[in-house]
Amino acid sequence: MFLEVSNSRWKLSEDPDDPKDGLWIWGLFKEPLYPFMLLQMETKELTLPSSGDDENADSIPPLKLYAQINHFRNKDEGTVKLQTANLNIRILEQIQLPGATVDLFEEEAVGQVSFQPL
């Protein structure tokens, strides 16, 4: 049993906390100043096996998963390695202010993601 990914995207980032950042292309060729890969995956609903009525079966709803993955370059070997990172979901909290609503996201770790070269 596994979660099926329905959509995903990634981008290299100079500073994940600054949404105006762009791809620092030279980070692919020498030691990156801000070595982050931001990964987002969306999953499909997963129905869990049950011994009874399928209509009342438990399920895991579709999720949006996020990870901030550090990567570094080994100058001697000429390789780039991705480190293990927490896989998070974002929990939305809406705060009502006079004349405005503010959306705050808190990330909660639900697992880890790691990469193995082929």
Image: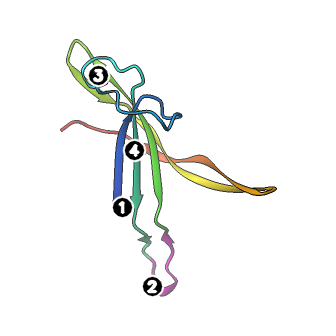
Q: As shown in the figure, which amino acid type bears the numbered disc 3?
A: Trp
Query: SS for tag 1?
Result: loop
- Eyeballing the image, is 79 above or below 1? above
Q: Which span of residues is magenta-colored?
A: 50-60
Circle on res. 54: 2
Q: Foreground: 8 or 86?
A: 8
**Residue at the image point whose x is 47% and y is 30% from the top:** 15
Mark toward the start of the polypeptide (3 vs 2): 3
Mark toward the start of the polypeptide (1 vs 4): 1
- Eyeballing the image, is 37 above or below 32? below
Circle on res. 2: 1
Circle on res. 39: 4
Q: As shown in the figure, which amino acid type bears the numbered disc 2?
A: Asp
Mark toward the start of the polypeptide (4 vs 3): 3
Q: Foreground: 46 or 78?
A: 78
Mark toward the start of the polypeptide (2 vs 1): 1
Q: Residue furthest front?
A: 99
